[in-house]
Image: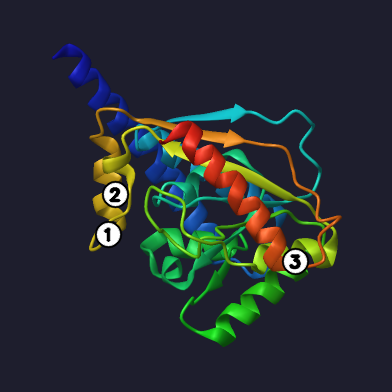
Amino acid sequence: MLRFVAKWLWLLWCWVELSVFTAVLYALSWLPRPLTGRYYHELSRVWCRYLVRALGIDLRLHQKNTRPVPEQYILISNHPSALEDFGIPALFDIYPLAKKGVRDWYFIGRISDRSDTIFVRRSDPDSRRAAMEALADAVNKGRSIAVFPEGGCKGRRIHSSFQTGAFDISIRTGVPILPVFLHYEEQDRFEWHDPHTLLHKFWHYMTAQNNRANYYLYDAISPSGFTDKQAFAEYVHQKYLQWQERYLD
């Protein structure tokens, strides 16, 4: 009982800290864009760490890579939950691609927008093309980006195929793919199910019996040797199936 009370008192304090930090970032987001540059992006990453902590998540980065992480990369991962929208920026200095609906998530949407998240409406071909060009432009500016090649939350198991946008950008720019495999130990609690909302998932995370989130980082994959984006995507997809067999099956 004492441990239960201590846990919720700690989470309450974390939410107080997060609320204050959110209010500061939200206020700063109303400044003209030239005044919310790189520093705002860095503050948004700190905000993600505060949120992960307030949700009571035990987020762990497992460095399975044998080579140093390159200075610039295109990070990809599987997408079973909503937590990775915050967990990945908490761990990696990236500019992510997110669904257009994230822009409407209360304070979160405005903070994401001002931290230069790139938004896409997946059902709109024009929006998808514009998003891919925005991602390529970010890479050409020297930024690292993050993409979910499954094309959305597809459940706890790897989707049948990967979309090719990230791999096309990698081939065009020469920037390597950095694969991260996500494993939430209490999968039922973390997995996104319709008609869940973000608030539903926050409550699920906070009340999970097993709060461990494992993010496995592997060696970057160079696009050299690939001229076809579909073949590149399939090559990496096979690696994710192998990691799924190792960690989930």
Residue designated by label 2: 201
Horizontal side of 219 relative to 190 (left or right) equals: right
* Residue that carries the numbered disc 1 in the rendered image: 197
Quarter-of-image position of residue 153: bottom left
The reply to whether the C-beta atoms of the residues labelled 3 and 2 are less than 8 Å apart is no
Give me the C-alpha separation between circle 1 and circle 3: 32 Å
Give the residue drawn at x 54%, y 70%.
119
Check disc 2 and give the amino acid type: Lys
Residue 154, horizontal then vertical, whole percent: 40, 58
Tag 3: Cα neighbours inside 10 Å, few (<14), some, or many (≥20)?
A: many
| Quadrant position of residue 209 | top left
Compared to 126, does 156 lie above or below?
Answer: above
Can the viewer see residue 62 in this picture? yes
- Amino acid type for the residue under numbered disc 3: Ile
Helix, strand or loop under label 3: helix
Q: In what quadrant of the picture does the C terminus appear?
A: top left
Q: How is the image coloured?
A: rainbow
| Label of residue 169 in the image | 3
Helix, strand or loop status at disc 2: helix
Residue 24 position, x and y percent, is 49, 50
Front tag of 3 and 2: 3
Q: Position of residue 170 (x, y in %)?
A: 77, 61
- The answer to whether marks 2 and 1 mark residues whose Cβ atoms lie closer than 8 Å is yes
Disc number for residue 55: none
Residue at x 72% of width, y 37% of height = 219
Can you say whether 137 is above or below 177 in the image? Answer: below
Q: Amino acid at mark 1?
A: Thr
Q: CA distance from mark 3 to mark 2?
A: 32 Å
